[in-house]
């Protein structure tokens, strides 16, 4: 199946203590951390196109421009959605959004590039 505009992915998690700014080192409060929200958004983008990638290929994130607009307490469910908004060769652009049980907590744009998994790893580990 070909990657097409409008494809969507969604992932959910429960905001746990280990997901807080205090625990991940991005702040000193017990609230859902921005880096965790970013990872959830990337996960939703991966989910949106996973079934369309041939065996041996994956995507890697190359841009994430997000806004974390409100805090989420420990214990709330968090959900991220990603929608494909552009496909330019191997570059896929997504609209990403995140929500907790009270409403929207984040939004932004994310880009991923299709790569051959093994070639990417070989090139990366050649740095050692």
Image: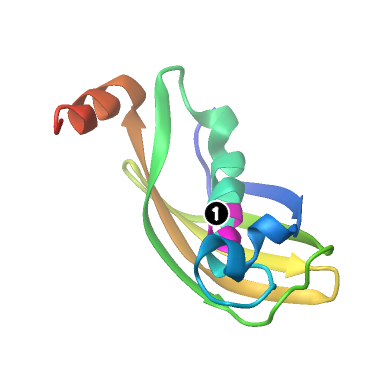
User: How many circles with numbers are drawn on the protein?
Assistant: 1
Instruction: Tell me: 112 left or right of 16.
Output: left
Q: Residue furthest bottom?
A: 69
- Is the C terminus in the top left, top right, bottom left or bottom right quadrant? top left
- Relative to 61, residue 66 above or below: below
Q: Is residue 79 above or below residue 120?
A: below
Q: What's the coloring here?
A: rainbow
Depth check, front residue: 69 or 25: 25
Outermost residue to the left = 127
Mostly what secondary structure, the magenta segment? Answer: helix
- The structure residue drawn at horizontal position 61% and vertical position 49%, both measured from the top left corner, is 44
Answer whether residue 23 is magenta in the image: no
Q: Is residue 80 visible?
A: no
The image position of residue 96, as x and y in percent, is: 57, 62
The N terminus, quarter of image: top right
Q: Is residue 111 visible in this depiction of the protein?
A: yes
Q: Position of residue 127 (x, y in %)?
A: 14, 33
Mark 1 crowdedness (10 Å alpha carbons): few <14, some 14-19, many ≥20: few
Q: Position of residue 33 (x, y in %)?
A: 60, 67
Relative to 88, 93 lies left or right: right
Give how far across and how far down residue 59 sits, in percent.
Answer: 41, 38
Answer left or right for 2 relative to 74.
Answer: left
Q: Which residues are magenta?
A: 36-40
Rendered residue at 40%/25% (across/down): 57
Quarter of the view holding residue 124: top left
Residue designated by label 1 = 39
């Amino acid at each position: 199946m070909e990657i097409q505009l409008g494809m969507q992915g969604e992932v959910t998690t429960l905001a746990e203590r280990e997901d807080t700014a205090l625990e991940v080192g991005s702040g000193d409060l017990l609230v859902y951390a921005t880096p965790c929200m970013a990872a959830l958004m990337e996960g939703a983008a991966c989910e949106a196109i996973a079934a369309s990638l041939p065996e041996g290929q994956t995507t890697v994130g190359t841009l994430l421009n997000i806004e974390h607009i409100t805090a989420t307490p420990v214990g709330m469910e968090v959900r991220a959605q990603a929608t494909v908004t552009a496909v330019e060769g191997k570059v896929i652009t997504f609209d990403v959004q995140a929500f907790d049980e009270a409403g929207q907590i984040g939004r932004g744009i994310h880009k991923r590039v299709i790569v051959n998994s093994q070639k990417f790893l070989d090139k990366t580990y050649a740095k050692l």
